[in-house]
Amino acid sequence: MLSKRIASRLQDLETPFYLYDTELLRQTLESVVNESQRYNYKVHYAIKANYDDRLLSIIREYGLGVDCASGNEIRKAVEAGFDPRTIVYAGVGKRDKELRYAIEQEIMAINCESIEELTVIDALAAEAGRRVDVALRINPDIDPRTNHCIDTGQADSKFGISYEEILDNAARIRSLENLNIVGVHLHIGSQIRELHVFENMCLKVNVIVENLERLGFNFRFVDVGGGLGINYDMPENEPIPNFASLFAIVHNHLHVGDREVHFEFGRSIVGECGELITRVLFNKTTATGRKLLIVDASMTELIRPALYGAYHNIENITADTDRTDKYTVVGTACESTDRFDENVSLRRSKRGDLLSIKSAGAYGMSMASRYNLHDLPRAVYSEDLMK
Ligand code: LLP
């Protein structure tokens, strides 16, 4: 882990901040590119995971496309130099001005999530005098066996259009004159560690694509979304996620002829390359005997533990003893759920020590807020520190 190796250089920096290991990011990108090329799979980066400019410029070097969830994310990707023809845009609630911008940029596809959205895009396309490429985001009703807060592909979810609704409206969809229905899109959830879930997804996609083509659709691509999980428990054991296994599963189970196959990875690209570095402010013990370690970061830098009960491995990287204690690590925000972990064993910690909250590269900085008028977190890059 980077921070531990260079702890003495971090000691005098103002905390809290995100530390990015750009070398690990490069190795991760090399892995995803090499493994995907074996099957000619196309990879997009889900920019919602982290839109940091420096990270984006590295990701762009490796030729990935981008998956966006808002007009501003598309703008960010375009400004970062990504080719609009590699940008896909999903989201249940796209505003008209966002759709107009996506149409104007001629992105690869707008991934539509309702029949009503398809009719609105058709009208906006007519207004712009263009035919617009869209994909149908289908809700495949699969349990991704992940934290319920981040599953997206079950029947009752707000995401995607149910397969039945597409069947019922097939003729109507095909009659929309200003749309090219070029693809099928799915994304069943995030932080998926049980890879057999993707097998089920592929089997469903095979049936969906075959049946819809029989009804006259003609798809150029199938986009199976993101979701590959990372090892939050022991990140050191698995700094680069297992892209090879996922691709092999998809290769063995997805049968969609010579259609392009696309992926949209967020967490698995940037999750492990980021750590949140925070300093111990105070020790205190509650009346019930709980030892609190109060640190200078909070849910405003990293909301995942407070929002989803997500686990991040924490380590004291500057302690001067190997003796440990059990702590509840809490942040500075005025919220009782603002805690990073409970009853966690750390090397005995004192005011001024630095802690690393690991695997924080994805959905950390991008979900930061200014609650309590906290400053937005700063970023420090390994390649600058190594100069
Ligand atoms: N494609 C679509 C359509 C998505 O909605 C997402 C993530 C991705 C791709 C990328 O998924 P990934 O490869 O990162 O699993 N804030 C939550 C995660 C929300 C995920 C939202 N969608 C967290 O902190 O865990």
Image: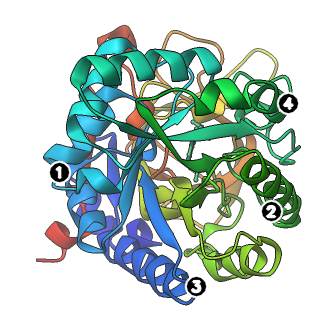
- Residue 97: quarter of image: top left
Mark 4 near ligand 1 (CB under 8 Å)? no
Q: Is residue 358 visible?
A: no
Give the distance between the C-alpha atoms of the residues marked 4 and 3, in whole angstroms.
31 Å
* Label 4 crowd (10 A; few <14 / some 14-19 / many >=20): few
The mark nearer the N terminus, 3 or 1, is 3
x and y, in percent, of residue 367 in the image: 44, 31
The mark nearer the N terminus, 3 or 2, is 3
Kind of residue at disc 2: Cys
The mark nearer the N terminus, 1 or 4, is 1
- Residue 270: quarter of image: bottom left
**Outermost left residue:** 387
Q: Residue at x 14, y 45 (%)?
A: 79
The mark nearer the N terminus, 2 or 4, is 4
Give the distance between the C-alpha atoms of the residues marked 1 and 4, in whole angstroms.
39 Å
Where disc 4 sits, the SS reads: helix
Query: Which residue is label 1 attached to?
Result: 80
Image quadrant containing the C terminus = bottom left
Label drawn at residue 202: 2
Tell me whether circle 3 and circle 2 mark residues in contact (CB < 8 Å).
no
Query: Which residue is label 4 attached to?
Result: 164
